Amino acid sequence: MLDSDLKTQLAGLLQNLRTPIELVAHLDGSDASKETRALLADIVDAGAGKVTLREATSSDGERVPSFQITRHDEDVGVRFAGLPLGHEFTSLVLALLHVGKHPPRIGDDEIAQIEALDGEYLFETYFSQSCQNCPDVVQSLNTMAALNPRIHHIAIDGGSFPQEVESREILTVPQVFLNGQPFVQGRQTIPEFLAKLDSGAAARAAEALKDIEPFDVLVVGAGPAGAAAAIYAARKGIRTGIVAERFGGQVQDTMAIENFISVEYTEGPKLSAALEAHVRSYGVEMIPLQRAEELIPAKQPGGLIGVRLASGPVLQARSVVLAPGARWRQTGVPGEAEHRNKGVTYCPHCDGPLFKGKKVAVIGGGNSGVEAAIDLAGLVDHVTVLEFDGQLRADEVLQRKLRSLPNCSVHVNAQTTGMHGDGSKLNALSYTDRSNGETRQLDLSGVFVQIGLLPNSEWLKGTIELSNRGEIVINDRGETSLPGVLAAGDATTVPYKQIVIAMGAGSTAALSAFDYLIRTSAPAAEAIAA
């Protein structure tokens, strides 16, 4: 199952096991079980006596193939159903290590919070091997289950259990059920799970923020622009903080990155993790899981600027770099909101495998849309690309590839007018041919919306100058209409929304913030109303 190089690497990692572990497998004579048995045998060989395998004599009530990772004579609830390969192979390795009591890379406070959770929790996570967001969820819940015996987690490969996916109407991954009921969808980390499970966590976090001293530079947003700004500010030796709902921003949802200069290929979650590690290495004060709600201008030149958080506290700083990023733009047509994650989706890499053998549409004929159609063509029965303009806007090399695929069709001058279903599942899309006014309907199971980005700037309206598209207006130094407030990244008027450009803009904004600080005298201390 595993090649020799991978087995050698795995053997080296499993030397870190601090206690023996046992794999308890539920298998039958199917090809999928044979592959699972071969994988588990390779793990046992790599474990050099620290890992044993036992095939359960009865599989009643158990998914087949599946296996549990446990300690001898202990109830540890970490399970995989289906093959954890692709993006999930790392999740498997980490699960082996953590069940074997190799310490996870999380803070002592988080470990204590996990261990203190009371009650009984059975999590079921549906993933696809091509989903780049799924490993964060799987690894988070596996770690929690390895630390707390009251927490059990089953990571389920949706492609291995299509009937189960169909019966539970799962049309997007990752999707998590808790004690048999839908719990969350999309990428989640341990702090986010703890915030949901620990009822007092949010209040404690908000209380702790009330006493934070003012920053020299406060960065709002932790995507490429925000990370670069925080690093450049911290390198100047000034007190720097960064506040965001999640680190990485939109990059977390990016699959293949092939135009990041000097790096031939990487993926969004990997780049996000590297950015976070780099920021942390400079001692930047991280304020995660917090959403900015209001920008409070300084009362006098050089005075403190406030950023009010949705949880209540106001953070203060002598200068602020805004890097709130952007989100997927929605069509706004009837039926889209009702069927989001029920057939309407925005991530072809994550959710594409759930539509295997079905008919789907991609809305958008730019690079993102055509790339999505090309990726989906290898999985689904047929892909229809709908473009509002009179021609596709993707690069010609992508258009040539699309035209070469026999199960793809393109409709230009197509204005999407509705997405239809019964509220629980999408089954059709209607559009108008703008060239003749004719209305048409496509019977399909999925719609992938790829029509660009929308800046996360609504909370800034009325405070700083925004363009008619809602973008933060900046000059070539990253300065906004408010002194001491800089901005960078996809939420600004910069013409090209690219990772490398966002990083450069974040660096520019931080240097401009430093220039503002050294040229502006701080007035006497002032209070900002909380």
Image: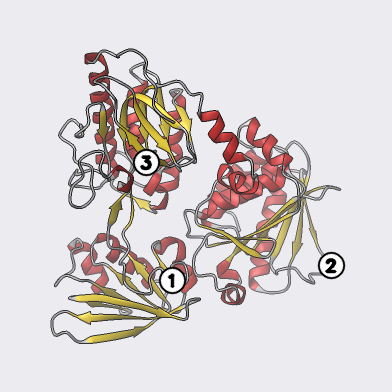
Residue with the mark numbered 1: 338
Alpha carbon distance from label 1 to label 2: 45 Å
Direction from residue 12 to residue 99 in the image, left or right:
right
Residue 72 seen in render: yes
Q: Quadrant of the N terminus?
A: bottom right
Q: Quadrant of the C terminus?
A: top left
Residue with the mark numbered 2: 57
Q: Position of residue 433 (x, y in %)?
A: 19, 81
Q: Nearer the viewer, mark 3 or mark 1?
A: 1
Residue with the mark numbered 3: 223
Q: Residue furthest front?
A: 529
**What residue is rendered at 48% in x and 58% in y?**
131
- Contact (CB < 8 A) between labels 3 and 1? no
**What residue is rendered at 13% in x and 81% in y?**
435
Direction from residue 140 to residue 426 in the image, left or right:
left
**What residue is rendered at 53% in x and 50% in y?**
188
Residue 150 lies, with reference to residue 345, above or below; the image says above
Q: Position of residue 436 (x, y in %)?
A: 14, 85
First in sequence, mark 3 or 2: give its number: 2
First in sequence, mark 1 or 2: give its number: 2
Q: Position of residue 265 (x, y in %)?
A: 36, 47
Alpha carbon distance from label 3 to label 1: 29 Å
Q: Residues within 10 Å of mark 1 (few under 14, many from 20)?
A: some
Residue 381 seen in render: no
Direction from residue 334 to residue 150 in the image, left or right:
right
First in sequence, mark 3 or 1: give its number: 3
**SS of the residue under disc 3:** loop
Name the residue type under label 2: Thr
Q: Position of residue 234 (x, y in %)?
A: 37, 22
**What residue is rendered at 19% in x and 60% in y?**
395
